[in-house]
Amino acid sequence: MNSQYPHQPESCMNRRDMLSRMGTGLGMLGLAGVLGDENLLAAETQSAAQASSYQNPLAPKSPHFPAKAKHVIHLFMTGGPSHVDTFDPKPLLTKYDGKPLPGGENLRTERKTGAAMASPFKFQKYGESGIEVSELFQQTAKHIDDIAVIRSMQAEVPNHEPSLGLMNCGASVAVRPAFGSWLTYGMGTENQNLPGYMVMCPHGYPTKQTQNWQSAFLPGVYQGTYVDTRHTEVEKLIENVKNSKLSLEQQRHQIDLLQQMNQAHREQRGFDPALESRVQSFELAYRMQMEATDAFDVSREPKNVLEAYGDGIQARQILIARRLVERGVRFVQVFHDKGQPWDSHDDLEKSHRRLAGQCDQAISALISDLKRLGLFEETLILWGGEFGRTPTVELPKPGSNQGKVNGRDHNHYGFTCWLAGGGIKGGQVYGATDETGFKAVENPVHVHDLHATMLHALGFDHKKLTYRYAGRDYRLTDVHGNVVQQLLS
Amino acid sequence: MRILALPLPLFVVFLITAQASAETKFSPEHIEFFEKSVRPVLMKRCVECHGPEKQESGLRMDARSAILAGGDSGAAVVIGKPDESELIQAIRYESYEMPPSGQMPAEEIAAIEKWVSLGMPWPEEAEPLLPATFDERLVDDKQHHWAYQPIQNPAAPKVEGDWAANDIDRFVHHRLSEKGIAPSEKANRRTLIRRATFDLTGLPPTAEEVAAFENDQDPNAFEKVIDRLLASDQYGVKWGRIWLDVARYSDTRGYLNDGQDRRFPYAHAYRDYVIDSFNRDTPYDEFLKEQIAADYFAEEGDRRLAGLGLIRIGRQFLKRQDTIDDRIDVVTRGVLGLTVSCARCHDHKYDAINMADYYGLYGVFDQLEETTPLVGPIDADPNYPQFKKKLDELQGELDQHIANVNRTIQVEASTHFFDFIVRAVSKKQDVEIATFEQNELDRKNVRPHLVSKWKLFADREWKPDHPVWGPLFRARELGDEPYTAQAEALLAEWTGEQSTLNPAVRSALVAAQPKSLPELVDTYDELLKPIGQAYRDDGFNRDAFRKFEGDQLEIAKSLLGRNSPVVLNDNDVRRANFTSDRNHQKKLEGKIRGHEIDSAGSPPRAMAVVDRDKIHDPQIFLRGDPGRRGDRVSRQFLRVLDDESEVAYTNGSGRLELAEDIVADDNPLTSRVMVNRVWMGHFDQPLVLTPGDFGVRSDPPALPQLLDHLATYLRTNDWSLKKLHKYIMLSSTYQQSSEDRADVREKDPENRLFWRMNRRRLSFEEMRDGMLKVSGELDASLGGRAVEILKDPNPPRRTVYGFVDRQDLPNLYRAFDYPSPDAMSPERSKTSVPQQALYLLNSSFVQRLAQQVNQKWKEDPTLSDPQRLERLFQAVLQRSPTEQESEMFLKYVESSTDEEKWSKWDSVAQVVMVSNDFMFVD
């Protein structure tokens, strides 16, 4: 068999799985460059191809083509931030404030909306590109020349769960692997002492819970590892990361005994990569204990860095995101808070001001910090929610809203996300909504297109990053997705 | 001139090409060979990327001329010369690797080679090749795809020597001999009993059991071990869990957006039914029938009804069609190994399964009512009376709430006429309407549905000259201000001599002189109030109109008559509920469910289904969109597995007929899929490498005759899985050592021919249960509601009884390759990640078990360190430590110190428990 398959993808799924499941893209990869430093198995006298059959599925792998971006930080504004109050100014709304929108009826969203609602926030031009950003993200706006603002995003339905599914997993309803799962499946991760796909959300889960970072039919190792960033102690962040009985030194002594026993066991049995692979996993675990503790401990940062990020949980988790990326974690997702905090059906001014106030400074600091560390060019940052909000005011409904008429409903017809960092051409606005901000009319970018573009920035042809399951090759973008070349540098 | 310079072979090619294209006459045999062996391969493997739609590298493979013309890199074929043809090199994976998704089976490669050698025979008229129609594929697949061919009962080949213990071995030995491979040595007795015990019970043997077997001189010693293990109730725990992977078992329904309790009330009844069925050795065909259609033949109280949980325990999606899809998938992919759900939106790209097939089954699984029948005596639990008392209280509370809300809504609908009518008549915004002083209700207390009822009533019943509603019709048409402007004239018309209005209405208008729209509505409000009163007094009975006479009768008859906005049915009441009413109802329902789930004494119920009373034939949803209906199709079995008759199901939803089709003698898949699964359970590797896909893209097994032999064995031995286990385990093939043999590995690196036993790592369940057992903590009792095994105090039940929340599967489960409970899982991944090791090193659970192992002898000061070590090894590994091991362990003990609450012996015990020796089965 081996002679027929000179180029093997490596994994400790058994080889049969990989052969039948890996898509063409990965199947064509050579072994060169894919053996992570942890893969000591190849040192065996056996052929590399054979040894590879049981290697660590998270070992780093090259993408389809060389690319700048190597990591992703997804700043998820769960609930749907209003684009017309942040990155997509619509003066027309001020003109028609309180009056019906010109041009007739409102598009159908989750709930009923009425007259136009002016943005309560001031917009201003920033940077050489002169892109307008509202006061809510005035700190982030300082980096606008590094940011590509996509004002023509589109999702499929005006409801949270399906739209979260679409944004995170490329499918509104069906159970599909998350972007981070696909990416760690395709690229592995650079630091074997930390999980490759980390998810942070303080106080509990966001809406749709763990389905946002599910690996679905991909092997479980590609699922996001969730941490509740309300906690600061590393033991509460990562399960079993600390031994309560033994010091590290004593534990090393114990692991040495274990490895001696395993070594003797293996010698009796001859070649078996699965045995060796398990031996290695204990070494990785031992190192993870130190590395994870270090990664999550922001107090090790210098004072000026801490001050740059500011106070509060957002600042801490965004700083942790940087520390994780710095350590080679592939995909870091930062959910703003449990549930759907940005879902401002009413009191929009108050809540958007509060929420943006919690993260604006830290996002700005993140970009500066990544630049300072030379990581900006290899880190792809995505900012956005699962959809945007209506330019019209949401009408109160018996049983909810309690008579408040000062918020906006969900809007999947048009909204804003922005990209920055690795492989992205900053200082540009791509696409546009109509003059009211209701619907993307110029160069619409569907979420599938966003995913295809991001994968491209990471070096993947989204059509070739596939996995065979239930008789079919699946991919993140299903049967859709077009790469938006203009967004790429 | 240049032609003369060509190398000779190429020159020859030109000649042949010219000749072929001049004549294109091929013998009928060669054309038939093309049709049978080449065309399907080209269509299946090549044309998708090299055909009319896409021409990767400029190459098309759907016409002989196009293949000869070649692509960007020149001609794809040198006629008559396979070795020199780029096409052949590519499919051999010598140059390009085509098709890129995986190499074609050897037979297909051989067919293409032969075809090139023959000069590429091609029928004259077939250029380009057109994709086969669905009907052609149906016929073609039925005739040619290996998995659809009838199961053969091949005679076992003759083999030399006395290695073979039964026919399994003859099939295996025969193939091994062909490859010049000798089978491996028999495993030693400790290895054998450990293997057998984990295989059949998911637990390690005890040291005593190992010793007894090692000392048993009886030639049937191993058979006795197998019989003992098959008779153990722990067998069902192990193999039931394997089936639960297929059944996508979970204790929760999935995501709920309203914060409700997401636990299923009786998922455990299905889990217990499965384990019990394995222990009873229910024939596999019966087992399937029970899970698909038990309600057709089992009465209330029958345990078999719990089998219907298979249909119920999938994820409950927010959209119903997805839930039905999941039911179709679990039955088709799980039982038949076919991916039918591809045909939900379009005909299957590969398999001859189309939307008519899919929606035929959709009709079977859609038209069901969910039930919770008893699967035993209602008072099976002695605590039942207390349970029932509390249940009645809660139910009473719920009934009371529903009755109250119901009454409130009915009263409102028959009282506050102004509030509803004005909203149906006025064109003003609700905010403004709310300022009318005649309103009786606060704006937020006006139920939108009751307004809608009036709007509907007005649309359907009001006419300009209606004796009762005419004025309101006119006012509604005019709108608020115009009415005021014209009120005088209108009132004159309505109250004048010529008026055809109902006299009672007329006098009311005369008296009130309503000059504005609210005043007009208020006039009606007063007119209608007595009728509403009568309706209420009569117990919300529409016959109340009979109490009225004369002018009043006409008004009452209309108000309570057709499309009445006052007479509400259950659906109206439900829709008129405020969100707060509904939430309170949900809360009370949640309490009842919580009581049923959490309290002792709840009756033994299960989650089941029955057919709806009225069954209709399903309609295709075009592109899977329920809003776009296509043809109506009959409910029937997949045609690719059916004989010509294509009989539509008529008995209810058709589930029993479906189940019978699934287990029918002429269905080749059900038994093949199951024996493949059982084989995988024993050898850690299936015969057919895609256990969830036996469709046309699946490759035949390396040992096709063995697969059919086993399928025949299962069917002719009462579909008994226990007999099948025993048959497999008594084979010499099963009893081989797992030791590596480098020379043989060269020939068959993946052990496709089973020249040795595969060493396998314990599953998550086997690992946890095994550690519990060797530490003496295991509670091996069966059945009951799920327990939180990962939460303190970590109940020592077998892992299958752990609570499985599909919405929040613990990281630990995923880290150890536990399958996603969201879809049928044909096999588990095998990964090795540091999170596994972290759990084994640092979790308080594993530490507790390590301490527990030592507990029995730790305090005995008479024991020497070597004696302690001996006991430890016997307890965990059922063997003595080797000399080398003794040395390393004793050295560790000498060089380590005891900690508070953690002794060095605890560290030692932990090492042995998490060692590869424990975690792998040889």
Image (tube, helix red, strand yellow):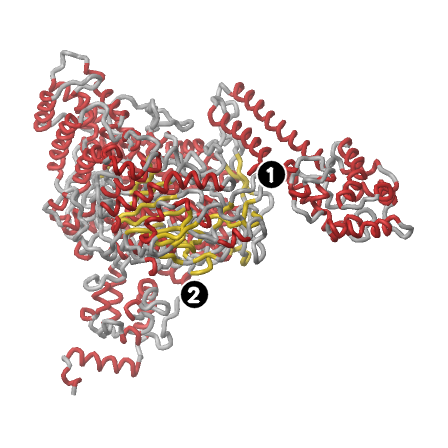
Tell me if residue A166 comes above or below residue B631 in the rendering. Answer: above
Residue B132 placed where, x, y %? 40, 66
State the residue in front, B303 or B405.
B405
The numbered dot on residue A398 is 1
In the depicted structure, whether residue B674 falls above or below residue B222? below
**CA distance for labels 1 and 2:** 56 Å
Residue A55 picture location, percent across and down: 20, 44
| Secondary structure beneath label 2 | loop
State which quadrant residue B395 falls in: top right
Q: Residue A122 or B327: which is nearer the viewer?
A: A122
User: Mark number for residue B886?
Assistant: none
Q: Chain of mark 2?
A: B
Three-letter code, disc 2: Thr
State the residue lying farthest toward the right: B497
Three-letter code for the amino acid on which mark 1 is drawn: Pro
Position above or below: B245 against B133: above
Check residue B133 in the rendering and tell me which mark sits there, or answer none.
2
Is the residue at mark 1 from the same chain as the one at mark 2?
no
